[in-house]
Amino acid sequence: MNGGRLLAISDLHVAHADNRKIVEGLRPGSDDDWLLVAGDVGELSEDIEWALATLSARFARVVWAPGNHELWTPRQDPLRLRGVRRYEHLVALCQGLGVLTPEDPYAVWDGPGGPVAVAPLFVLYDYTFRVPGAGTKEESLAIARENGIVCTDEYFLHPDPHPSRDAWCEARVALTERRLDACDPELPTVLVNHFPLVRDPTRILRYPDFAQWCGTVRTADWHRRYRARAVVYGHLHIPRTTWHDGVRFEEVSVGYPREWRRANHPRVGLRQILPEAPPG
C-alpha cells in the first residue's frame, strides 16, 4: 500500500490562458498521488496533448475519461478526424503518454481508502434527460431551441460512423457494461465519467433544457450496481459534493474563467477522492 491520494479534476479548458496557468500550477502532494481527469481538457489536439503530457510527468498515474470538447472537430484544429476515429486517436495519444483511458484495463488503487478498481468511462449522452413534458428526443430538442438552448456539440461533435450521438451512446453503454460486469465482484470501484451518471445533479442548471446533453438514464443504477465507493464527473461546471443512495458523487470541474472568478464560487483545483477527506 502506498501513502498517496487519489485526486481528481475536470473541465480544464486550457484554451483559456488563465486555465492553462491553473494546469501549470497543479502538483501532487507526494510521489504516490494519482490524478483522475474527467474530460474537457480542451478542444484542440495540441492543447489536449500538452495538458496530459504535463500532468502525466508529475503524477504517479493519470487516468483520463473523455469529455465532449475533446471529441469536437473544430475548424482550426489540424487534426480533422471525426467521431470514433478522433476518439481512437486520443486514446493512442494517451497510451503513448502512459495515461490510462476507458480502453485500458482498470487499474487498482491500493493506497489509503483502497483497494478499489478505478474505472474511466466513456458513455456520452442520448437525450433521455428530456425537457419535462417532451415525449421524444425530437420534441425535447425543439423545446430547447425555442428557448434559445442548443449545445455546441450539435455542430462540432460528430458521431461517425454511428448515425447519431445517441446511437454512439448506446454502443458505448453496452460495451462499458460488459467491461464493468467482468470486474471482480468483491472489489469496490471509483467510476470516472465526464457526464453525471444520474440526472439529479442537473436539476440546478441555470438552463434546465441543457440537461439533455448531460447523460443517459441507462447509467442511473451504475453507482449501486458496480459497488462505487465514489463517482467522479464534470461537465456541469458546478463543483460540489452530493450523495445518491449513500454513494458520494464529486463534480470536479474547473470551468471557464468567467465562472470560477464569480464571487462565492467554490475554489477550483484538485479534489481528494480517496482517502475520503473529513467534512469541512
Image: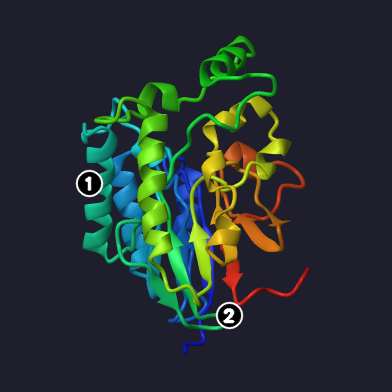
Q: Looking at the image, is mark 2 or mark 1 earlier in the sequence?
A: 1
Nearer to me, 241 or 184: 184
**Label 1 packing within 10 angstroms: few (<14), some (14-19), many (20+):** some
As displayed, is residue 200 above or below residue 241?
Answer: above
Number of marks drawn: 2
Residue at the disc numbered 2: 113
SS of the residue at dot 1? helix
Q: Is residue 18 left or right of residue 129?
A: left
- Placement of the C terminus among the 4 image quadrants: bottom right
Residue sitting at x 42%, y 61%: 180
Residue sitting at x 41%, y 69%: 183
Residue 65 position, x and y percent, is: 41, 53
Give the CA separation, mark 2 to mark 1.
Answer: 33 Å
Nearer to me, 6 or 166: 166
Residue sitting at x 35%, y 66%: 56
Q: Is residue 193 left or right of residue 83?
A: right
As displayed, is residue 110 above or below residue 204?
Answer: below
Amino acid type at image mark 1: His
SS of the residue at dot 2? loop
As displayed, is residue 259 above or below residue 210?
Answer: below
Residue 144 position, x and y percent, is: 60, 17
Which quadrant holds residue 96?
bottom left
Residue at the disc numbered 1: 89
Amino acid type at image mark 2: Gly
Residue 247 position, x and y percent, is: 66, 62
Residue sitting at x 37%, y 59%: 179
Q: Is residue 59 visible?
A: no
The way the protein has been coloured in the rendering is rainbow
Q: Is residue 237 left or right of residue 170?
A: right
Q: Residue furthest top?
A: 146
For marks 2 and 1, give the one nearer the viewer: 2
Q: Residue furthest bottom?
A: 1
